[in-house]
Image: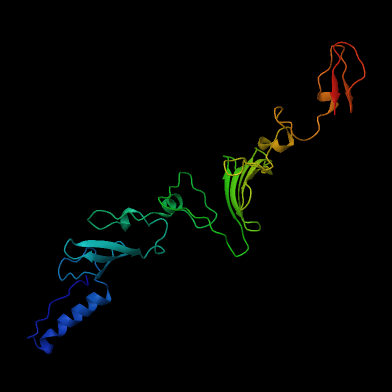
Amino acid sequence: MAQNYPDIPSTETLQNSRQKLLDRDDAVASCFAGTTFPTAGLVEGMFCYRSDEKRLYQLSDAVAITWKLVFDLAKTPLHGEEVGSAAYKDAGTAADNVPTTADADGRYVLKAGDTMTGALTALATLAARASGATGDVHVNLQDETGNARGQLSWQRSDNTVRLRLYDAIGTLLQELVLATGDVTIDGGKVWHAGNDGAGSGLDADLLDGQEGSFYRNASNLDAGTVADARLPSNAHGGRTVSTGMPAGGADGDIWYVV
């Protein structure tokens, strides 16, 4: 084994140190190769090539005597068959759980084109950003088959935020639009406390499509014209409207002088 790394006292002559220097050179050149880990002259960061395993280890803790595998020379470094296996755990100590390729595929999300099977929790802010200076932003909601059932989006062209609801075949059912002006649902203005006054144009502000100023209070007919059809009839079912006093008539007749 090339694990002999003898100490050389400062008082020892160069002639007497020759073999020790050669032994130390062999140990360093071979990465302290041997079938066991060295137990003497340990220095944190030193390597040990286990010739029986064809694996290179590094001493990560000289006090706890912790050797960690760097790579297996019989395989490609960090090969999927080895990463996360027992060989990549601390030699003789508690393991560092380095994930295998399969673990990484299931435990970590790719930056593009991946699918998460569980819930994603954002403790502060979850941001969706436009990809460029001309792009919009979309967050799509899909059912288990991948069909679009809803969408939250920001549309750059008119600076609107839109919430859309789709049926199972992708037909748009409803769309809520938040804009700098009116808020609309399917193109219709949303009625709320900030826009329900006179002049809003909402049907809830109108009576038969007319503003309140179109109508007169029956006890306040001080202006305007009352249509003949709105005047009460006499006992015979008739009424007479004239510009002067009547010259005759029958009992029960009603005359209106204008």
Residue 106 horizontal/vertical position (percent): 45, 49
- In the picture, measured across the screen, residue 154 lies left or right of residue 49, that is right
Left or right: where 63 falls relative to 77: left
Judge whether 218 appears above or below 2 on screen: above
Residue closest to the eye, 61 or 180: 180
Report the number of numbered marks.
0
Q: Nearer the viewer, residue 197 or 18?
A: 197
Task: Give the quarter of the figure containing the C terminus.
Answer: top right
Q: Residue at x 27, y 66 (%)?
A: 58
- Residue 31 lies, with reference to residue 11, above or below; the image says above
- Asked where in the image residue 186 lies, by quadrant, the reply is top right
Q: Quadrant of the N terminus?
A: bottom left
* Residue 197, percent from left and from top: 62, 41
Q: Is residue 80 visible?
A: yes
x, y percentage for residue 64? 17, 60
**Which residue occupies 41% across, 60% down?**
79
Q: Position of residue 52 (x, y in %)?
A: 28, 62
Looking at the image, residue 204 lies above or below residue 254: below
Q: Looking at the image, can residue 147 be seen? A: no
Which image quadrant is residue 101 in? bottom left
Colour option used = rainbow
Q: Residue at x 38, y 54 (%)?
A: 99
Residue extending furthest toward the left? 11
Q: Which residue occupies the foreground of this view, 52 or 174?
A: 174
